[in-house]
Image: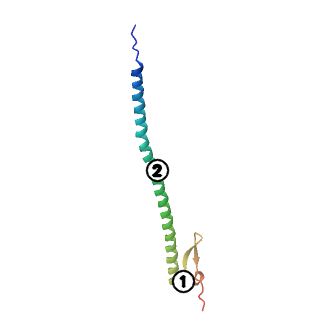
């Protein structure tokens, strides 16, 4: 039969200390990247929100430009399509959409 080797308490204590030290270093080395990933995730979310707001604003401005171009076209041709509540509506004359001037 084989002989068993007993490890003394001081040696075992040294092994546990080394293990605990390596565990702490591993936790610290993982904490920093996790914080960076979280920070980048927040930055990405904020960028997406800003991009969405910019897109909405650009669409609103494009709608206004479309409206004014149609008004100009209407003034010249006396008939055009104008957006009314997100639908295009035919307008027979420029006077139908513009307020009458008070004399």
In front here: 40 or 18? 18
Mark 2 Cα shell of 10 Å, populated few (<14), some (14-19), many (≥20): few
In front here: 78 or 57? 57
Q: Residue at x 55, y 75 (%)?
A: 82
Q: Quadrant of residue 2?
A: top left
* Horizontal and vertical percent position of residue 91: 58, 78
Mark 1 Cα shell of 10 Å, populated few (<14), some (14-19), many (≥20): some
Name the outermost residue toward the bottom: 103
* Horizontal and vertical percent position of residue 22: 40, 32
Location of residue 24 with respect to 64 vertically, above or below: above
Q: Residue at x 39, y 25 (%)?
A: 14
Q: Are marks 1 and 2 in contact (CB under 8 Å)?
A: no
Q: Seen in the image, is 53 located left or right of residue 87?
A: left
Q: Nearer the viewer, mark 1 or mark 2?
A: 2
Location of residue 90 with respect to 45 vertically, above or below: below
Residue position for label 2: 41
Q: Rounded to the nearest whole Å, what is the CA distance between mark 1 and mark 2?
A: 54 Å
Report the quarter where the N terminus lies: top left
Q: Secondary structure at mark 1?
A: loop
Q: Seen in the image, is 103 located left or right of residue 50?
A: right
* Horizontal and vertical percent position of residue 37: 44, 47
Residue position for label 1: 78
């Amino acid at each position: 039969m084989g002989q068993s080797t007993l490890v003394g308490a001081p040696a075992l204590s040294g092994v546990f200390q080394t293990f605990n030290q390596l565990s702490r270093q591993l936790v610290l080395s993982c904490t920093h990247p996790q914080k960076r990933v979280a920070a980048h995730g927040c930055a990405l979310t904020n960028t997406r929100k800003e991009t969405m707001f910019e897109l909405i604003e650009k669409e609103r401005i494009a709608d206004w430009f479309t409206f004014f171009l149609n008004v100009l076209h209407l003034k010249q041709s006396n008939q055009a399509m104008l957006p009314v509540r997100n639908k295009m509506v035919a307008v027979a004359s420029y006077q139908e959409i513009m307020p009458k001037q008070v004399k």
